[in-house]
Each structure stands twice: as C-alpha cells, then as structure tokens.
Amino acid sequence: MAKSLRSKWKRKMRAEKRKKNAPKELERLKSILRTNADVVMEEVKEVATVLPPRKVLEQGDDCRMDTDNKRNKKTLLDQHGQYPIWMNSRQKKKLKAQRVKGKKKSKLAKGLAW
C-alpha cells in the first residue's frame, strides 16, 4: 500500500511541514521546561524513580531482557523450527528453498538402475 502518487505527495508535504514547524516546537518545549522545570520534576518524582544519566548508562548491560527462544541468525528459525512472527510467507518460502537446496540428495549408484 501507500505507493500511489497522492500518498507520496502527502508524505512529502508532511515532511516539509515537520521541517518548517521543528524550530517552533523546540522553542515551545524549551520555554515549558524553563518555566516549570522544578514543578515538572517534582511531579515526575512522585510517579517514577528519577536517576542521573550516568547511573542509567552503567545499568545498561543489566537491563537486557532474557529471552528464552534462541534463533539461528542464518535461517532465522528458533529452537522449535518457527520463523519470526513479522516474516511473511514469501520470505519463509525463499529461506526454506535455500535450506532445501543446501541438502542435496545423494545419487543412486549407476550400476543398480533396472
């Protein structure tokens, strides 16, 4: 989808609008943070734990999710032989064809054919 001329034009115009409005948005955000910075931070502290950036970077390695499924990077199959949910059927078919092509069947001996 989204390949028609109309959608391309709309996407282009939205991008131009974002470029045009970006400086105004940035100024508005800065002004909001300048005026109510202390108030905003106090409200945030009530809801969440506020950490300095250094501590967050130090904890970066510990925050990884431990996923149970191990996926082969070449075939993209997990341990149960399932493809990822985002993969469409054409991509699955293509990868399967590559796998099957790699497993060529051994030929029968020439002298035994009837």
Image (cartoon, rainbow, N blue to C red):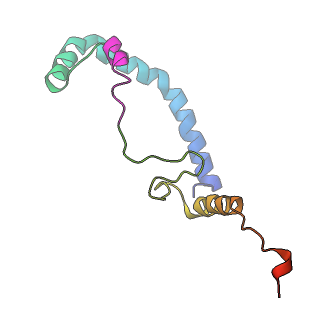
Q: Residue 1 versus residue 99: which sits nearer the camera? A: 99
Q: Position of residue 97 (x, y in %)?
A: 66, 63
- In this picture, which residue range is highlighted in magenta? 53-65
Residue at 33% x, 18% y: name it. 56
* x 58%, y 52%: residue: 75
Q: Residue furthest left?
A: 46
For this view, does 19 lie left or right of residue 5? Answer: left
Residue farthest bottom in this picture: 114
Question: Quick one: which residue is furthest to the front in this view?
Answer: 111
The answer to whether 64 is drawn above or below residue 86 in the figure is above
On-image quarter of the C terminus: bottom right
Who's the residue at 68% across and 58% down the image?
A: 98
Residue farthest along the right direction in this orientation: 111
Q: Quadrant of residue 101?
A: bottom right
75 and 8: which is toward the camera: 75
Quadrant location of the N terminus in the rendered image: bottom right
Residue toward you, 55 or 20: 55
Residue 8 located within the stretch drawn in magenta: no
Could you tell me residue 89's position as x and y percent?
A: 56, 64
Does residue 20 lie above or below 78 as drawn?
Answer: above
Residue 57 shown in magenta: yes
**Which of the 4 image quadrants contains residue 13?**
top right
Left or right of 50 in this view: 20: right
Q: Residue 104 in the image: x percent, y percent?
A: 72, 64
